[in-house]
Image (cartoon, rainbow, N blue to C red):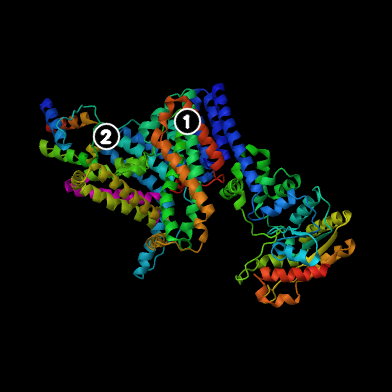
Amino acid sequence: MLRLIKYVIVLAGISFLISYSLFVFLNIGLRSQKNDTFPVINELVNNNENIQVLFIGSSLAQNNINPIVFDSVTKSTSYNFGYPGAKIEHSQMIIKRYLNSNHPPPQKILIMLEPYVLDTTLEINFPVQYYPFYKDTIIYNFVSKYDPDIKFIKKFPFLGVTKYNDYLKYLGVSGVLFPNRLTSKLLKGFEPLDKNSWKENNELPKNRTKELLISKRKLDPEIKRLEEICKLCSQKNIQLYFILPPTYKGKREKNYNPDNFINDLKLIVEKYNIHLFDNSDIDLCQKKELFFDYHHLNKKGADIYTRILANLIN
Amino acid sequence: MENSNQEKLYKIFAKVFDNPNLIIEPQMTANDVDGWDSMSHLSLIVTVEKEFGIKISGAEVMRLKNVGDLLELINNKTK
Amino acid sequence: MLFNSYSFILFFLCVVLLFFSLPSRFRNILLLAASYYFYMQWKPEYGLLLAFSTIISYYTAILISKKKFEERKKYIVACIFINLSILFFFKYFNFFNDNFRSVFSYFQLSYPIPNILKIILPVGISFYTFETISYLLDIYYERREPEKKIITYAVYISFFPKLLAGPIEKSTNLLVQLNTVPEFNYERIVEGLRRMLWGFFKKIVIADRLSLMIDPVYSLPSNYSGVYTLITCYLFAFQIYCDFSGYTDIAIGASKILGYDIVENFNFPFISKNVGEFWRRWHLSLSNWLKDYLFTPIIFKRKGWKNYALVYATFITFLLCGLWHGAKWTFVTFGLLQGIVISYELMTKSIRKKWASEISTKLYNNISLVLTFHFIVFSFIFFRADNMHNAFEIINRLIHFNFNSHILSEFNKFGMFSLGIVFLTISFMHFVERKYQPSLVGFNNNIKINYIFNCITLTLLIILGYFHPQIFIYFNF
């Protein structure tokens, strides 16, 4: 019996050691990856430069604002920290994590908002992209709320590789072996969308809109989270902007009506001295050629809108 | 009588399996003989029926476990 | 409770510890309790079905053993009829009902019998029904005495490692062993563990990864290029092999740890030189069952027909073999394809021998091997497809052999990376099994190789496994 236990322990020990080394190896590769939103998370965790303006939010930030255009207009340094499908808690985590690093706080933070960010029924998108950063307390606390796999990785790092799918393994290996061949679609976090592919059917699920805009009770915790962000920023002397980005007016969803949402926002805006810009109905919203779908601008649209926004802020 | 039945049966085996040097023992089963598949099993039983002039029913075939059983069946039927 | 789940590992550990710490007279009771607990995790009601089938076959066996051979027939027919009716009701009722309805409506007649909604197939029913029948027929043909102790018999039918998807045990093997007392044996346990580990490797590393690549193609064939569809068809042969033989390895390993040897189910099926041989190497326990209790009785009943009896028996056997896998036209087609080719092989046996001697035997064998493998891969299309339409759509993609697809990412860098892993792991499996037999018996002799091999397998399992438990394909049958 003892002999058997010894046999199994030694066997498992060797295998765990090898798989842990591979896990470390893959993490090195993944942290230098340029695919997907890895560059954004890297910028968040490893950045030591001084960024003056942060763009925060979901794909509405990621696809609509081009920091390079913004910088050229305002003569500042900015970075787009938009993450696909990010909700307010996600944005809060990103702001917290950025302020936690060893560099001066930014002067301005622009949060892109729309009624949908209040929907907390959805989990975070692609939590796997955060796995290589599981040792980072702020990131871990946020991701572990939604994804038990990252808890497993933290508890059993020697088995962590079992939670990496083939795609992550591929990215990890290529990150280590071919670091020079990696390219990113992102421009300082901004992901330009192809101007040629207007997606007619790409609407948001209708039932979500309805539920969100009617039942106000559900929104409260999320509005509170926004308030926490406001407090944090006012402590650090950061000017906060709430922005409702443009949406195409050609054929709207019937229930889309941001008025309730804006009223909610107004309560905090006055209290914390925040600038609120509702751009959801500006002139550019009539021009189909600037949009990728009803909610996202294409590259050309993003450049034009960024210019407009930059002038507003200045 | 019984010995001659045995000799005759072994000759049938040699013929069916196309192997004059085939050594057959009473306790041997289909697994012990190369090429003893369903096809040769069928032709074996058919040949036995013809050569000994007996009828063997399906249920009787199913009850055979080895060569010895077959020999015993033949002995009983030719009595 | 899936074999590839944490709860099974915990369950199995408890059973093993209890098994070896209990006095031997309680062991069969423990195994029975564990097996029913294991089975009733799926759906408790179906445990009753299993118990019912066990009890009637147990008493029928005792009853007929006291009768003369001539009187036995009616009892055995009645008991087999009851067992098959249960199987038929759960597995085939809706299928035949649907088909009768289409026939009736074709002649514009009304058909009154409605389908029974949502019959959930009791998992393992095809396997244990066949075991019950094999036991009854063995008694009927006087191949063995009936088992006296009902607990031992019940363990034989419900023994949890093989309950859900075989191997289909003959009463002359496992039932005999259940009457002996296995000792705690270090070598046996290490061997059993290694066998289980190997099974997990095949299932979790190869079969589950392949399932991720293959399932989307079979659900939407029109999205994929002909080339990728072709690759998928080949890969499916390996998926089903690794899935089923992986399951069997786990079953055999688990039994071995407890001290019982259950039968092997595979013997390098893909090196077969003809389709008949393939069925003597693939799912052996089912093939042997069909041969012993269906094919052989038929040919001797019709022995006057000479060789046509063989063809007739082949068709019936493979038709039922197809239907055994499930109540679908795709499985019927799969069975018929096998029947056609095996009949051809039976009728041309002597001619083919001549061909082989005319060209060199080695060349002939290699050609046969390639042809057989391709036929098997082709027939597996019907095995895997959800319906006939789907199968023909796949075949259509194969005919229009092209690189065009709606999804262009099949052959990108990541796609090649995945295919690379698949290729390497299948090669590793092939190398190991060819060298040491599928049962890995060759490993016993060399402790060092043994250790290194276990280490490599475990490491590969951890770093390449796909750890989101997937059901075993053969649980559906």
Q: Which mark is residue C192?
A: 1
Q: Main secondary structure of the magenta part?
A: helix
x, y percent for residue C293: 30, 42
Give me the chain letter of mark 1: C
In this view, the residue in front, C25 or C3, is C3
Q: Which residues are magenta?
A: C301-328
How far apart in space, not on screen, are marks 1 and 2 (Cα)? 43 Å
Disc 1 to disc 2: CB gap under 8 Å: no
Mark 1 or mark 2, whichever is nearer to me: 1
In the image, residue C323 lies in the stretch drawn in magenta: yes
Local secondary structure at mark 2: loop
Residue A91 placement: quadrant: bottom right
x, y percent for residue A271: 89, 62
Residue pointed to by mark 2: C68
Badge 2: residue crowd in 10 Å (few <14, some 14–19, many ≥20): few
Q: Residue at image x 57%, y 24%?
A: A6
Q: Is residue B54 above or below residue A259?
A: above
- Regarding residue C79, the answer to whether it shows in the image is no
